[in-house]
Image: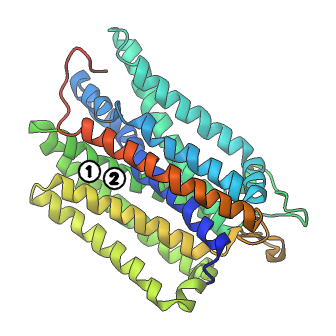
Amino acid sequence: MNFDWQTLWFILVGILFMGYAVLDGFDLGVGALHLLVKTDKERRLFINSIGPIWDGNEVWLVTGGGALFAAFPEAYATVFSGFYLAFMMLLVALIFRAVAIEFRSKQPMKWWRQFWDISFSMSSIASSLLIGIAMGNLAWGIPLGTDHEYAGTFLDLLKPFPLLLGVTTLALFTMHGSIFIVLKTEGALQKKLKRWVKNTMIFFILCYALTTLTTLIFIPRMLITLRQEPFLFIVPVLNVLAIANIPRNVSHGRGFGAFLSSCAALVCLITLFGIGVYPNMVFSNPSPENSLTVYNAASSVGTLKIMSLMAAIGFPLILSYTVSIYWVFRGKVKLDSHSY
């Protein structure tokens, strides 16, 4: 594992997508759980818990996509052309989720609110599944030609392993979202949601165990970097400790501690994914020689150096904006005349 400009930008792009998963992951989790609460007040509380921050969270996705385009243009072209239909479906789902948040309370009619409630929840579930399926295909590998173009169809992306990782991603986001909504609510609703954390954790742990076992059996190359760099085994250890710390914090009423533990688990899981796929950007299956790596897919070293200077200026701005927004909208959700 060589620490060079290409590897640096592999890590930086990963951090941007990691920021999106941590921040928008609980948004998607809250949306996936939305239909499980029945009263209009409870559903408004769900939407208002993420209403002021969801669009800021998606800045990380846009920035990550831009960084991928600039740092690894060939990988960007291959992924976005090969996954074109899947990405269009993801885009439609994200748009519907945004519209549902804004439109849901514009009219008092029951049918109107039910329609947008269903749109909000279904689009959140679809987005989570599609993100996981995309990651599953990058881990499993996709057929690439000698020109590094995708040589399959949309249905080729729906293999068992990517579908399993899609469900696991949904389980992870629902756990993350349930913890966040416990942090933002109080009273009887919070007590009910604490039970949801236990159920979503069980769902996630079962999916995670099955995904891990499947990966070890069918994709042993995901362990190559771990075996070459044994110190990286600290990552799965920290992941287990973070997940184990969630129910302890919830049982002691430490909602913020549980949320930080959930964020840490997400960070560790995405780090493990990055370690597993490195040095590949897009692994070619069944022709590994056609794979796109951090070296043959990267821009020139000069370009990466200039981008590093820009990142040194821009990244602190994005981070400070995110921190300030969360600070302004901290505390429990209250419904008033300005609420969604």
Residue 243 sits above or below residue 314 on the image = below
Residue 125: x %, y % from top left = 47, 42
Residue at image coords 52%, 57%? 312
| Residue holding disc 2 | 176
| Residue shown at 55% from the left, 70% from the top | 274
Question: CB under 8 Å between callouts 1 and 2?
Answer: yes
Locate residue 190, reporting x and y percent.
Answer: 15, 42
Is 60 in front, or is 41? 60
Quadrant in the picture for residue 244: bottom left
Q: Is residue 298 visible?
A: no
Q: Is residue 1 left or right of residue 199?
A: right
Q: Is residue 260 left or right of residue 32?
A: left
217 left or right, relative to 148: left
Q: Amino acid at mark 2?
A: His
Q: Which residue is mark 1?
A: 179
Label 1, residues with CA under 10 Å away: few <14, some 14-19, many ≥20: many
How many residues crowd mark 2 within 10 Å: few (<14), some (14–19), many (20+)? many
Residue 142, position as x, y percentages in the image: 75, 63
Query: What amino acid is found at the position of numbered circle 1 in the picture?
Result: Ile
> Could you tell whether 150 is left or right of 72 in the image?
right
Q: Is 311 above or below relative to 279?
A: above
